[in-house]
Amino acid sequence: MDNAFIAKEFKWDCRSLRPRQRLLSRVVERVLKLQLAPLSFCWENANVEARMNVFHLVSQTAFYRVPGDVVEIGCNSGEMSIVIRKVLDTYAPHKTLHVYDSFEGLPEPAGDDSSNGIYKSGDMSASRRVLVGRFEQLGLDLPHIHQGWFEDTIPSQMPDQISFAYIDADLYSSTKHVLPHVYARLSPGAICAFGVYYDETVFRRDETWDTFKSPGVKRATDEFFADKPESVSVLYANEYSNGYFRKSLDEA
């Protein structure tokens, strides 16, 4: 299937500058007397590379008919949900897409999340209305929306079998709560991807903001996989690093 929609239907490709952005870049260069890279602004929560990663991962599980439905935990305003739904419509329209979010942003960080000093209560807030509006604008069937804190919706509102999962929980506590329940429901050969998984031993980015690294996510994930047959691999996504693992086929 074509994947050009990833760049054209929303402003996900932040390097495609609009005329006003080009003008602002020229003004800044003249004022500061410096030769700068063109200034680009993107108001979405991830970039085109992250969307491409998920496009290919979901396509794999759908094309190879891995059994189970699809879950996105931390769907925000539905940007990644649209990528997933479009792939499913082509390869597996019978699958149900379940999305989970408080639509109130993050809970109050505690413990290690608090000591990291990266996030605060309400960060990453999104509107359910925006998510619904985006799906309607594109003529896509709405996902099954589970609104509430993860502790209230997971695992009680999860499908019994999962073929693809996307976890974007930001915090150590949230990832630690969600991951065991997702893992237990993944079919053999299923894929689970992480919105952020930053491993500086694989690819170090000193200039990347801490909010693009979410150290609590890696810590919770590494702890969980310490005694598992799988391991998480890093996927380059420009200023982000995604992660993913494939559920072992030994359980088939």
Image (tube, rainbow, N blue to C red):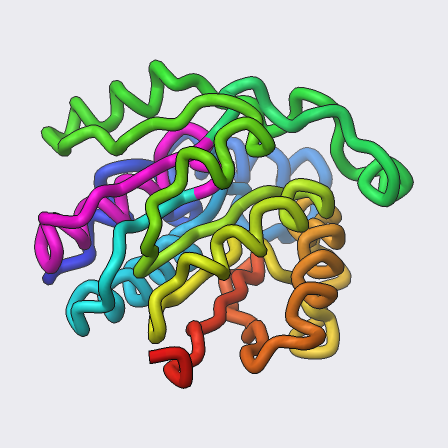
Q: Which stretch did the figure color magenta?
A: 73-100
Query: Residue 198, located in which quarter of the rendered image?
Result: bottom right
Q: Position of residue 214 (x, y in %)?
A: 70, 50
Extreme-right residue of the structure? 115
Q: Nearer the viewer, residue 187 or 8?
A: 187
Residue at the (78%, 31%) spot, across then down: 109
Tell me, yes or no, if residue 95 can be seen here: yes
Q: Nearer the viewer, residue 169 or 150?
A: 150
Residue 84 part of the magenta-drawn span:
yes
Q: Position of residue 114 (x, y in %)?
A: 86, 36
Q: Left or right: 153 with respect to 177? A: left
Residue at the (73%, 71%) spot, across then down: 200
Residue 152 part of the magenta-drawn span:
no
Q: Nearer the viewer, residue 63 or 197?
A: 63
Q: Position of residue 187 (x, y in %)?
A: 34, 66
Q: Left or right: 142 with respect to 159? A: left
The quadrant the N terminus occupies is bottom left
Tell me, yes or no, if residue 23 can be seen here: no
Vertical order, 4 against 114 (above or below): below
Residue at the (49%, 67%) spot, across then down: 244
The quadrant the C terminus occupies is bottom left
Residue at the (56%, 23%) spot, across then down: 125
Q: Position of residue 159 (x, y in %)?
A: 34, 45
Query: Residue 203, located in which quarter of the rendered image?
Result: bottom right
Q: Nearer the viewer, residue 220 or 155?
A: 155
Vertical order, 169 against 196 (above or below): above
Q: Left or right: 22 with respect to 170? A: left
